[in-house]
Amino acid sequence: MTFSRRTLLKAGLAGLAASAVAGCNNGAASRGEGEVIYWLWDSAQLPMYTECAKVFHEQNPQYSVKIEQYGWNDYWSKLVTGFISDTAPDVFTSHSAKYPLFADKGQVLSIDDFVTKDNVDLSIYQKGLADRWIGADGKRYGLPKDFDTEVYFYNSAFTEAAGISTEQLNSMTWNPQDGGTFEQIVRRLTVDSKGRRGDQPGFDKDNVKVYGLGYADAGGADGQTSWSWYTAINGWKYSEGEPWGTKFFYGDPKFTETIGWWRGLITKGYMPTYAQAKSGVDVTTSFGAGKYGITPNGSWMLATYAGLKQVKTKLARLPIGPIGKRMSMMNGLADTIWAGTTRREASWAWVKFLGSQTAQDIVAKAGVVFPAVSASLPAAKAAFASDGWDVTPFLETVEAGDVFPYPANPNAADVSAVMTPAMDAVMSFEAEPPSLAKANDDVNQILSATA
């Protein structure tokens, strides 16, 4: 079996962990011992964290923070290079898909002793968030900074023209047999080149002007913004030992029937082909150009959708499924300390500050993300409201406890290397949904080989 370059990265890191943990000066000669280098990837959050660094320095004059921001792909490649060359940042924003491997290879620092020594109150965070940063080894590798869930972004001009009410959008139901009222709405929103809707006589599925539902990709191993909630409300879960997968279930009939239904929307003409979806024009740009009626996405995309001035965008709840409720993946980011830093006290002081209500209030008031600290959430809701967003659909599943975690394990790169092409093949009609059972066997073979 051939794996991606990320798999090779995993093997390469195995021999590099010891040198990083042993510690080098990571630039100590050229900067003060109290200066922390901090990395993040989201340019929209750079101003807020610049303000956080200013307040942190005012409260802790012995420390200062230098912030560096890189785009998503460059960010992770530079970080790995930093691990290898002993030039990684002291502290960096981490993702639950990434840190398990870093922890497994000794590249990130456990903060349990710091948390205990300073008596950090972990109950201030949204329920379950703090636990997401406890690794498979039982050690803690970060303090939460924000969280995200998923909803549908819809073109309200299109729904009004189709005669679809806000109440209908927010009370959608779904099942894998006929798609429920959700599919009825998607069908109604689909319009062919002659103006006929998907639920009208003569609809031409081969010449579609507006697709009812848009999507970005086949979802790979997690399906976060494509199929994750459909599978969850159909009673499926990713693995045993969630979120630390020990045995995956991509071959489960509940999963394959869900994917089969989802792919069927392409056959019916309600959703673009995989080639169209991956044509190089991203899903938000296509939505902004009036090509899609509805697109699912995460809360981190609010600012992007707000920038689509040519369409009036609103939010709708995810549908209720066979299990009797709606579900959403709840993920989040945290700040993590590089194990090779020579500035552990300064780095911890910065991480602790970023996990505090003081810092998260600053971030919340910018209206870009939902803060992990519960008491900071009202400020974020007010900021989003001032920008015209009613973010209730993002938060209801959180308040109800109807959320599930992003699947995490140290072998995530290997799992993705198997599931991404397998899902791509299914959505491209090069393979049928039952073929995912073979991919699942390959995934579990990887897990058993590395156990």
Image (spheres, rainbow, N blue to C red):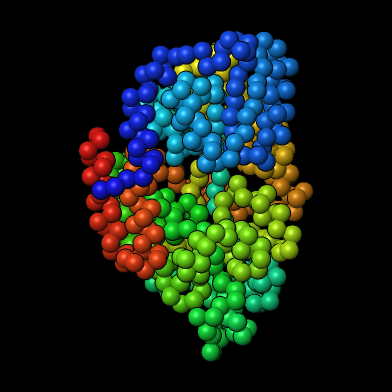
Most distant residue in the bottom direction: 202
In the depicted structure, whether residue 24 falls above or below residue 274: above
Q: For residue 242, which quarter of the picture?
A: top left
With respect to residue 107, does 75 lie above or below? Answer: below
Residue occupying image coordinates x 73% and y 28% = 51
In percent of width and height, residue 26 lies at 52, 17
Query: How many marks overall?
Result: 0
In the rendered view of the protein, which quadrant contains the C terminus?
Answer: top left
Q: In the image, what residue occupies the spot 35% across and 34% down?
A: 10
- Residue 396 visible somewhere in the drawing: no
Question: Which residue is at 51% across, 32% downward?
Answer: 78
Most foreground residue, 121 or 352: 352
Instruction: Check the image and report above or below for 293 versus 119.
Output: below
Q: Residue 429, percent across and down?
A: 37, 68
Task: Please state if 217 lies on the left or on the right of 185 as rendered.
Answer: left
Q: Nearer the viewer, residue 308 or 68?
A: 68
The residue located at (44%, 44%) in the rendering is 406
Q: Is residue 213 visible?
A: yes
Name the spot of residue 322 as percent of width and height, x first: 41, 63
Q: Quadrant of residue 253?
A: bottom left
Quarter of the image holding residue 91?
top right
Q: Position of residue 359 (x, y in %)?
A: 67, 28
